[in-house]
Amino acid sequence: MAPAAVDPTAAQLHLLCEHLLAPLRHDRCGRIGLFADHQAISTGDLGDGSSVAITRDGLVLEGSHAEVLALQGTTLGDLVKATGRMGGANHGIYHLTWPGDLSTPIDLDPAQLSAALGFYGQVADAIEQLGRIEGYEEISAPVLWPEHFDLASVDRAINIGGCFGDASEDGPYLYVGPHAPPPIGAAEGRFNRSYGACASWADLGDTARIVAFFDDRCNAARALGA
């Protein structure tokens, strides 16, 4: 069953990642990982110089010419058709969080869309800054995973990232998830979830505090043997 208590724009963005962007990237490149920053959630280069991106202006199709489609008052089918892809299913590549079909209405709230892009841009900035700290030289480039709707990197068996909205938390959140998570309450309460550590975006706020959260929880995990 799809989660119920999720912001409608977060849910529709997640649906578009699962049903539109990731399947298109998989068709062209054999990969499902997407890209995200302050400006867009994107397929990246699809192998021929073209790309499809969700931006504040709409769905941007870049190719031999640029086209921008509204993300309000449309349907998943209209957007799928515009990309030239037949159908909206993901062919069983991953488990869908949000069921949908070509008639599914798409009506993203512009303010919330802008907030989502700002969130993922800030997570990307924080991961980049974390990578400049000694000890994080091997951190991977962040990837937005369509099935989880999180922008995440990995550093030596520790997942580091953030999600704008799902059923597990009340609003956007940041997390550190060791592949072998410590018990809840470990490291003086730093690890507060079964998968590791979580903090709300509202509580952390600026990028420096997000970097500090990532660094502190990673160090605590390593001290416990992660």
Image: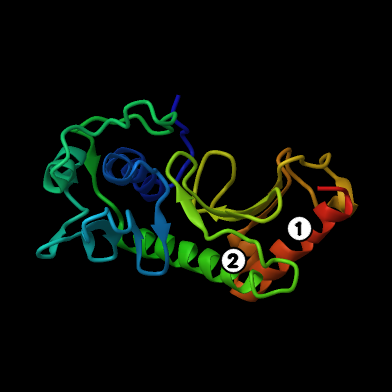
**22 relative position to 220: left or right:** left
What is the three-letter code of the residue carrying label 1? Cys
| Vertical relation: 26 (above or below) 158 | above
Q: Earlier in the sequence, mark 2 or mark 1?
A: 2
Instruction: Tell me the CA gap for discs 2 and 1.
Output: 12 Å
**188 relative position to 41: left or right:** right
Task: Say which element carries label 2.
Answer: helix
For disc 1, the marked residue is 218
What is the three-letter code of the residue carrying label 2? Ile
Query: Where residue 5 sits: x, y (%)?
Result: 49, 39
- What is the crowding at mark 2: few (fewer than 14 residues within 10 Å), some, or many (at least 20)? many
Query: Where residue 155 sits: x, y (%)?
Result: 67, 56
For disc 2, the marked residue is 127
- What is the crowding at mark 1: few (fewer than 14 residues within 10 Å), some, or many (at least 20)? many
Which of the 4 image quadrants contains residue 147?
A: top left
- Residue positioned 70% across, 40% down in the render: 195
Decide if residue 173 is in sight here.
Answer: no
Query: Where residue 182 sits: x, y (%)?
Result: 82, 42
Decide if residue 2 is in sight here.
Answer: yes
Towards the viewer: 119 or 60: 60
| Vertical relation: 166 (above or below) 154 | above
- Residue positioned 30% across, 39% down in the render: 23
The quadrant the N terminus occupies is top left
**29 relative position to 216: left or right:** left
Task: Say which element carries label 1.
Answer: helix
- Residue positioned 44% across, 67% down in the render: 118
- Residue positioned 77% across, 41% down in the render: 181
